[in-house]
Image (spheres, rainbow, N blue to C red):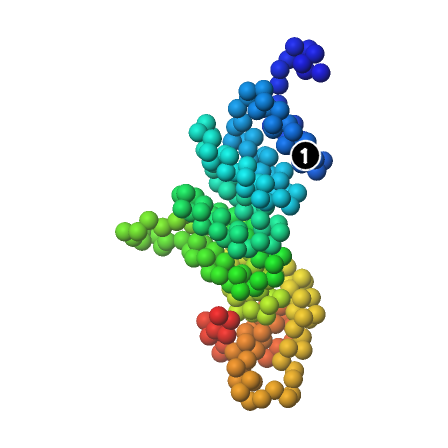
Amino acid sequence: MTEDAGIEPDVVSYNILIDGCIQVDDTAGALAFFNEMRAKGIAPTKISYTTLMKAFALSGQPKLANKVFDEMLNDPRVKADLVAWNMLVEGYCRLGLVEESKKIIQRMKEHGFLPDVATYGSLANGIALARKPGEALLLWNEVKDRCTAKKEGEKSDDPDPPTLKPDEGLLDTLADICVRAAFFKKALEIVACMEENGIPPNKTKFTKIYVEMHSRMFTSKHASQARQDRRSERKRAAEAFKFWLGLPNSYYGSEWRLGYLDGDN
């Protein structure tokens, strides 16, 4: 219609068309518009590449998103930014491909881009999908370090990465993974971080998970003494978590503190 009126679409027009295809799950249409644009001699912009990557990422085709990203890196007219890197990470995380995602994040760092909340949020979702709680502990340690700001007036010879401001999605996903995996000390650390950042933890959800998955965790009467000793610290952390939830527990008024609960390594 625009051509009949003597109006030629430009790169902005094609970017809108590609994004429109995403809205109706038409990945083939998005690619067709991208190729048509280039066939007409219209150079893709950073937005063009990233939008096409989004089409492939959301449709479960991260390898094609990676191919588009590589073309973007090789295009001297554009420069890949953090949004593009995050879209690539998102594509792999949507399939629970944690190791591939971590490799991309490492590449991203080597190119001078630090992960942000969106990067970590995608990775947390990928870890949850892959059911790899050990990876959640590693991710939480990194997030926790990034969340710790320098004290006022503190100086350092080494440049520190910018302080991370975590959001609800990231922390809730990490806490959910830790509660399901019975990493109660880490779960307490994460919900404490949520409260410090003004994010109300979903106690109703965590209570339901605990009751459904762990309410009989320490009720066995036939465990050996050695086994009981090994799990004593985990039990202390569980009682502290139950105290936080408001469930009946043996934590009330004790001398236990979060710093002493070191059973989740």
Query: Could you say which quadrant of the image residue 234 lies in?
Result: bottom right
Residue found 68% across the figure and 31% down from its top:
29
User: Farthest residue toward the left?
Assistant: 157
Residue at 40% across, 53% down: 149
Please, what is the three-letter code of the amino acid marked with disc 1?
A: Ala
Task: Report the number of numbered marks.
Answer: 1
Q: Residues within 10 Å of mark 1 (few under 14, many from 20)?
A: some
Front position in the image: 34 or 24: 34
Residue ID at (69%, 66%): 208
Residue 86 point in image, percent of width and height: 53, 44
Q: Position of residue 162 (x, y in %)?
A: 41, 47
Q: Which residue shows up at 65% across the image and 88% down it?
A: 221
Residue that numbered label 1 is attached to: 28
Asked which quadrant contains residue 42, the reply is: top right
Give the side of residue 74 with respect to residue 93, left or right: left
In the figure, is residue 169 to the left or right of 82?
A: right
Q: Quadrant of the N terminus?
A: top right
Nearest the camera: 70 or 123?
70
Task: Provide residue 246's location: percent of width, then percent of height.
Answer: 63, 70
Residue 199 in sight in this render: no
Helix or strand or loop: what does disc 1 sit on?
helix
Whether residue 151 sits left or right of residue 172 in the image: it is left
- Residue 247 horizontal/vertical position (percent): 65, 72
Which residue is farthest top? 6
The answer, for residue 179, to whether it is visible in the render is yes
Query: Is 260 located above or below residue 108 in the figure?
Result: below
Looking at this view, is 51 or 139 the one in front? 51
Between residues 161 and 2, which one lies in front from this camera angle? 2
